[in-house]
Amino acid sequence: MLGNKPWDTAAGVLIAREAGAVVVDMGGSPHAMNARAAIAANPKILADPVELIAEADRDANRSE
């Protein structure tokens, strides 16, 4: 997350959770405040953005 600290993202994570979103890390595990990134989505579609981002991350790492 580009050097963000937990307090940089805490409010956004709280708002997303209060709105009914599930917040996870890049691997789909429950979000921890020290995670390098967060994905927030409706629980019904969470698998889609997690897989899409994981695929993009794999592609980016292959081209390096």
Image (cartoon, rainbow, N blue to C red):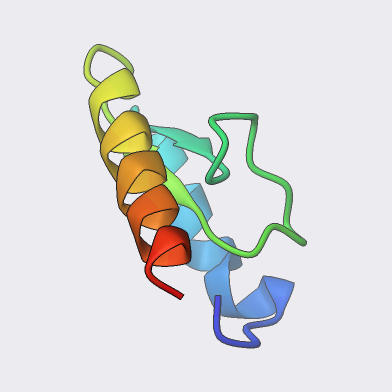
**Residue at screen point 37% across, 34% down:** 50
Front-lying residue, 12 or 64: 64
Q: Where residue 22 sits in the image (x, y, percent)?
A: 43, 29
User: Is 1 left, or right, of 41 in this rendering?
Assistant: right
Using the image as rendered, state which of residue 60 and residue 37 is in the foreground. 60
Q: Residue at x 62, y 83 (%)?
A: 4
The single residue placed furthest to the bottom in the displayed view is 3
Q: Position of residue 9 (x, y in %)?
A: 55, 69
Which image quarter: residue 2?
Answer: bottom right
Can the viewer see residue 19? Answer: no
Q: Nearer the viewer, residue 39 or 14?
A: 39
Examine the rendered structure and indicate whether residue 23 appears above or below residue 1.
above
Q: Is residue 50 visible?
A: yes
Q: Which quarter of the rendered picture does the N terminus lie within?
A: bottom right
Residue under the point 58% across and 80% down: 8
Please say if 18 is above or below 62: above
Q: How many numbered marks are there?
A: 0
Q: Residue 51: horizontal and vertical position, in percent?
A: 34, 31
Residue at the outermost front position: 63
Residue at image point 45% right, 37% down: 17
16 vs 44, left or right, is: right
In depth, the one of 10 and 51 nearer the eye is: 51
Query: Relative to residue 42, is residue 22 drawn left or right?
Result: right
